[in-house]
Image: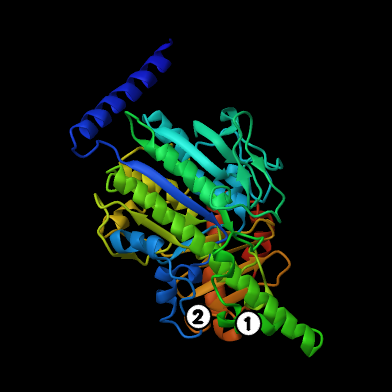
Amino acid sequence: MNRRGFLKAAGAASMSLAWSNTTMGQTKPAQPNLLIIHTDQLSCWAVSAYARELNQTPNYEKVLVETPYIDSLAKEGATLYNFFTNSAVCTPSRGCLLTGRYPHAHGAYRNNIEMNRDEVTIAHILNRHGYETGYAGKWHLDGEPKPGWVGVERSMGFADCRFMFNRGHWKKIVEKSEGNPEVSPYQVIGDRKTYTTDWLTDKTIEFIQKPRSRPFFYMVSIPDPHTPFTVREPYMTMYDPEKMIVPNTFEESASGNTKKRQGNVEALKRNKARYCGLVKCIDDNVGRILDCLKKKHILDETIIVFTTDHGEYMGEHGLYGKNQWYRTAYQIPFLIRWPEKIKAGTAIRQFITNVDFQQTLLGLMEVKPSGREQGRDASPLLRGETVEWKDEAMIHHSSLESTGIFTPDYELVLKSNGNHMLFSRLNDPEQTKNLSNNPEYKNVMKELTERIIKHNINVDAPAISWLKSEAEKPGVKHIT
């Protein structure tokens, strides 16, 4: 064994000894476990801890889904009310989360592009610090393969990757004694043992229950509530479509005769009811995972994160899905529990984004990051410390032809074709009035444009090429 291998093994061994001794002695482990529960296309309005907050703002909808198990993370930990993804589409968002780097930097700037092979993920870092790492569920960072079961040589630091698949939203998965699990066509819906969310939860519980002498980092990536909007019973029919709320902006895209418009409304309500069922199924499975940690007596020794890659418009502005420019796809749930350092009921209002995720978790765990991250360490905020913090979230659209910023007061999106979008987040929460050409907001446009240009220059983003024309407009400060 060479010197580097010896030091790595020795470090892992010392970590294992410290962790196992404290565990056997029923005292606090030297290092916490880390569990990330990651979902796909989950909007804030579908999590009751967030929906109650949104309900305080006019024109936001009432609580449609009660999510007590997810909410328990808020009650016993922290809720990040202004957590944003930097890119509201699966692949780039996931890359930002795992590397702390913007999409163009980690390489997977749009769906179905593989992440740069030399990226350093949080799994790589924790692996080197003696952690047992594992992953189950949708990965979506390995290019085109579908399902693309990922081998350890491509799992980017996750040692236990038997149940990691690249992409797909199947509703039934069956494990085989040999080879990869079997997936069914999308229209086939599994039962309590084979429905994907339940099946992945079972795999998570199996990993947690394994005997071990060192801390673990596990990430389960549930491919719901992404389309197709189908789920096993009783969740499929748990919510009444007639009780679903149609967004005020849904009619923006209505066309055709009255009968056709009514059909669109009925389809929306049906889809929304099933989406609520998908979320309820996720919440019940979060409850199963929490119960497993309790029975294992490691709940308080485990940092638990619940989040998603982006939101779902569900009829807002006549849209389904994501990757447009409206807030709902960008401002997403993020809850974290660790009583060792996070006070119960902590509410974080500062703006934190996906690229801040890796540094924040490592800062909380007192683990040194790789040094390649482009985000910020928000762990002092989670610990309740007062620190200087700039409230902004940067948008890096997967087309590379638009970029933008969220602030407490505004959202500005700059587009290469000049069709910019400016919304007042305070006066127009439904984002119905584009103020970009309003003379009264000339100074706002100027100030936010300068911030966007400066950011893109600092991170050497591709948008710099067409942002030059914005920088040359009268009144915009010259930035280099």
Residue sitting at x 43%, y 59% = 334
Q: Quadrant of the C terminus?
A: bottom right
- Is 14 above or below relative to 134? above
Residue sitting at x 56%, y 38% = 163
Q: Which mark is residue 249?
A: 1
- Is 139 above or below relative to 463? above
Query: Of all residues shown, which one is farthest toward the right?
Result: 256
Mark 2 → mark 1, Cα distance in angstroms: 13 Å
Helix or strand or loop: what does disc 2 sit on?
loop
Please identify the quarter of the rendering in which residue 254 is found.
Answer: bottom right
Q: Between residue 139 and residue 392, name the one nearer to us.
A: 139
Residue 295's spot in the image, x, y percent? 30, 45
Residue sitting at x 60%, y 78% = 241
Residue 146's spot in the image, x, y percent? 70, 43
Type of amino acid at the residue the image marks with label 1? Thr
Which of discs 2 and 1 lies nearer the camera? The answer is 2
Q: Between residue 257 and residue 456, name the one nearer to us.
A: 257
Cβ–Cβ under 8 Å for marks 2 and 1: no
